[in-house]
Image (spheres, rainbow, N blue to C red):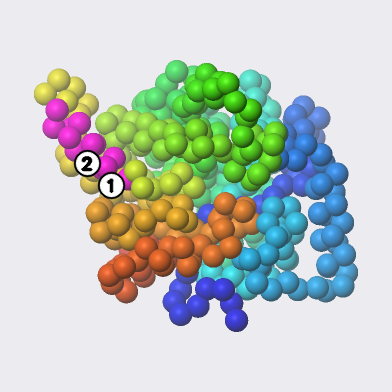
């Protein structure tokens, strides 16, 4: 029996665990030797030997035609079934039972997204998008999430078009200003217009976002605690990081609202993925309060034709963390904002994400659950009608 049963489930967050040469073997020759190596500092393991061992085990499974079951409760990370092999991922998806699944990368963005040489930065972006599209190409249920950098709007538009041509169905953008410019700056209007023209959503995701943590807060006179994966030296999330995760997406979305991006581009849509969602109801209220206060003194705020929160409701969906009280969020902010996600094969997704969400769904209607597990995903990916695009 598959893990997900009784209704259609769409998974708004899963990942590939990159192998050491994953980016370089998809890069153009003139870029390949200039890319920094894969950085494992955030992974809890410092050794490529760990990845090489996982690759060896995967090859042995392939040779023996071994098929794993109950993958949601199985090992995670590089040793997970389907972590980096596309044939295994299809098998994992059969076992999970999800109808569609967004697939993000994990660590490779550190090789190029902040590189000062724009040729290397965008060469890395193109290699990433090739790799993602290749991983997902053999299974229509898998949707490759490409990456973009806003640093050079012209190059960004080029890679957005190329990524769609390759087969990417959504694009992850770092939730941060670009060279002292707001993402709502008119310089980026060609990018937002291209998203609309190509009918694909943008994604904000935990990872390369605005720095919101002051290092001094970790200097408390005590030994540094383990990260969320249990690693002593890993640079993954710790409690102080977790508490400020929502700041970067709020800043980014606020810019898109009050700089008029959602007003100028009504077809623009996107998702906020693996950044929690318990903050969303109060954020929407604060947007509307801010609009009332500042429309007297800020022309850009006064120019908005809709209630500020309605731009978010029209354009953006959010994935809660397992363990957050999603039932309360839905009752507070409505049924149309939130999405199911598994985070497979990352351990943060837990060994029973559906069960954890279901335990908070007291008194929710079947219609509300249907939206959470399926319909809101369809609207984010396929537009307001929720029908797949031609």
- The answer to whether any part of residue 127 appears in the image is yes
Q: Which mark is residue 285?
A: 2
Q: Find residue 51 and report its horizontal and vertical position in percent.
A: 80, 48
Residue at 18% in and 42% down? 306
How far apart are the alpha carbons under marks 1 and 2?
A: 7 Å
Q: Which residue is mark 1?
A: 281
Residue range highlighted in magenta? 280-293
- The answer to whether any part of residue 379 appears in the image is no
Query: Is 282 part of what is drawn in magenta?
Result: yes
Numbered disc 1: secondary structure: helix
Please say if the residues under marks 1 and 2 sit with CB atoms less than 8 Å apart: yes
Residue at 73% in and 53% down? 78
Q: Nearer the viewer, residue 58 or 100?
A: 58
Q: Relative to residue 83, is residue 388 depicted above or below?
A: below
Categorize mark 2 by other alpha carbons within 10 Å: few (<14), some (14-19), many (20+): some
Q: Relative to residue 134, is residue 385 depicted above or below?
A: below
Judged left or right of residue 147, residue 24 is right
Where does the N terminus fall, quadrant-wise? Answer: bottom right
Q: Find residue 121 and report its horizontal and vertical position in percent.
A: 64, 29
Q: Nearer the viewer, residue 322 or 123?
A: 322
Judged left or right of residue 360, residue 298 is left
Numbered disc 2: secondary structure: helix
Q: Nearer the viewer, residue 231 or 77?
A: 231
- Extreme residue in the left direction: 296
Indicate the quadrant where residue 372 lies: bottom left
Where does the C terminus fall, quadrant-wise? Answer: bottom left
Residue at 83% in and 67% down? 61
Judged left or right of residue 331, residue 373 is right
Q: Find residue 68 and report its horizontal and vertical position in percent.
A: 73, 72
Query: Is 46 part of what is drawn in magenta?
Result: no
The majority secondary structure of the magenta stretch comes to helix
């Amino acid at each position: 029996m598959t893990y997900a049963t009784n209704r259609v489930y769409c998974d708004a967050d899963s990942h590939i665990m990159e192998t050491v040469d994953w980016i370089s073997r998809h890069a153009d020759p003139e870029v390949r030797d200039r890319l920094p190596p894969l950085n494992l500092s955030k992974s809890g393991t410092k050794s490529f030997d760990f990845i090489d061992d996982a690759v060896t085990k995967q090859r042995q499974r392939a040779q023996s035609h071994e098929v794993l079951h109950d993958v949601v409760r199985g090992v995670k990370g590089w040793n997970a079934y389907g972590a980096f092999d596309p044939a295994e991922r299809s098998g994992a998806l059969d076992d999970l039972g999800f109808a569609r699944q967004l697939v993000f990368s994990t660590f490779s963005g550190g090789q190029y997204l902040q590189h000062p040489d724009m040729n290397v930065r965008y060469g890395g972006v193109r290699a990433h998008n090739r790799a993602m599209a290749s991983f997902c190409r053999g299974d229509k249920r898998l949707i490759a999430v490409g990456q973009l950098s806003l640093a050079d709007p012209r190059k960004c538009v080029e890679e957005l078009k190329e990524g769609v041509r390759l087969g990417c169905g959504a694009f992850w953008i770092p939730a941060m200003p670009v060279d002292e410019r707001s993402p709502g700056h008119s310089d980026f209007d060609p990018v937002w217009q291209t998203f609309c023209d190509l009918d694909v959503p943008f994604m904000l995701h935990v990872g390369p976002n605005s720095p919101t943590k002051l290092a001094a807060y970790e200097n408390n006179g005590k030994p540094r605690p383990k990260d969320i994966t249990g690693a002593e030296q890993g640079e993954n999330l710790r409690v102080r990081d977790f508490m400020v995760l929502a700041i970067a997406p709020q800043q980014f979305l606020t810019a898109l609202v009050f700089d008029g991006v959602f007003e100028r581009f009504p077809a623009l849509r996107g998702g906020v993925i693996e950044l929690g969602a318990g903050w969303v109801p109060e954020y929407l209220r604060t947007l509307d309060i801010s609009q009332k206060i500042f429309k007297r003194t800020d022309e850009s705020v006064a120019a908005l034709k809709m209630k500020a929160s309605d731009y978010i409701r029209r354009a953006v969906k959010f994935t809660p963390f397992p363990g957050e009280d999603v039932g309360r969020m839905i009752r507070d902010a409505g049924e149309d904002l939130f999405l199911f996600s598994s985070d497979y094969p990352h351990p943060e997704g837990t060994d029973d994400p559906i069960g954890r969400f279901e335990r908070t769904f007291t008194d929710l209607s079947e219609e509300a659950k249907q939206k959470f597990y399926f319909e809101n995903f369809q609207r984010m990916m396929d537009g307001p009608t929720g029908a797949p695009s031609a």
